[in-house]
Image (cartoon, rainbow, N blue to C red):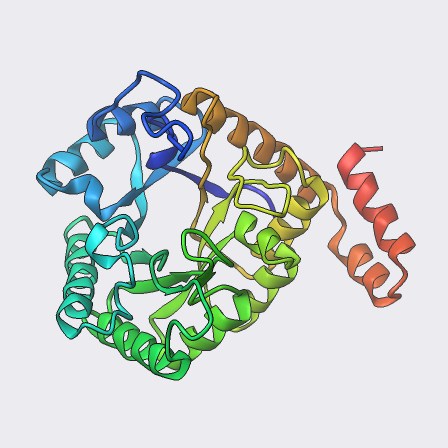
Amino acid sequence: MGNFKYAACLWALGGAADRFCPGGYTDKSATLKELVEIAGSVDGMEAVEIFDSHLDGIDPKDYLGWLSDNGLKTSCITINTFGIKKWKLGSITHSDKKLRQEAIDTCKKAIDLALRIDRPLVSLWLGSDGFDYSFQVDYIKQWDTLQESIQEIAGHSKDIRICLEYKLKEPRKYLIIPTVMKALFLAEKCGDNVGVTMDFGHALMGKEKPGESAALLGKYGKLFNVHLNDAYGDWDDDLVAGTVHIQETLEFMYYVGRAGYDGYIGFDIFPFRMDGTVAAELCIKNMRGIEKMLDRIDDNILKKAMESLDAGNSQRVVLDAVYGV
């Protein structure tokens, strides 16, 4: 059940900023080449996840060379439609046809880029698409536009899988894809090459059980990409994986494994006041511990315990795995 593949989300390694300190909490400013080198220095890291904007002005051949030099691959490309001023009121759901098409074309360019670097996975987190007030949008029209836009994007190349990343809120007060079931429903409507990026912290923020969400996505073959981190549940804290919710992380990875997921586990963290390299190393260390716990679980005994519906029975199995006694 263990032995997962891990990827560093490159935005985690070069110093992070928030709205209280927009310049960031470190003087470090790393180039893409340097970020790849940092990821390559972390024992156990096998790939990197990037924004499409990371490659602005960079020859993809150079980027592929940097990956090769550091023994890495690309796990996924996340499309940046959320950090651009012109799409502050929406990107692929914008009511202005010109602005909406520009956002769709940006997604298509990211797909073309994914084909050039041989990474058949593109993730779409629609941080600017949603609403903030009652009566701000026509919900039906916005939903129809969302579905039509995703279908157009997914139709650009059937060789590329499109991952819809859901999140309850932030930066909009209500994001258009807030929950696992809405993401799953939309993926089912939009085609075989449309699935879901599941973020552990986003699930907690939405009061979901991350393990259950992973199980449902796995059941319907829509678990396309995984982001791992940790959080206290009321916000998207993006803490080091495995530092707060040990049992929930264990259960989540159990169901990721049961789903037959063979992609990378991407560490989507924001270590504002911690060195990014150290944070990535801690993520790997914690997950190696989780893998050992998973290996100690007797799946047949656990399934029998769950059949009883008595939490005491399943907890005995799990605590033996956690504490190794």
In the orientation shown, which residue stands out farthest toward the top?
Answer: 27
Residue 46 locus on image (x, y percent)? 38, 36
Residue drawn at x 56%, y 27% as measured from the top left:
285
Give the image quarter of residue 16: top left
| Up-down relation of residue 246 to residue 20 (above or below) | below
Give the image quarter of residue 306: bottom right
Note whether residue 195 is visible.
yes
Residue 51 locus on image (x, y percent)? 27, 45
Residue 159 vs residue 178: left or right?
left
Residue 293 vs residue 114: left or right?
right
Residue drawn at x 28%, y 50% as measured from the top left:
77
| Up-down relation of residue 222 to residue 25 (above or below) | below
Residue drawn at x 30%, y 53% as measured from the top left:
82
Residue drawn at x 88%, y 47% as measured from the top left:
316
Q: 222 or 10, which is in the foreground? A: 10
Residue 101 vs residue 317: left or right?
left
Residue 98 vs residue 126: left or right?
left
Q: 48 or 1, which is in the foreground? A: 48
Residue 186 locus on image (x, y percent)? 42, 75
Residue 73 locus on image (x, y percent)? 29, 40
Note whether residue 221 is visible.
no
Q: Quadrant of the C terminus?
A: top right
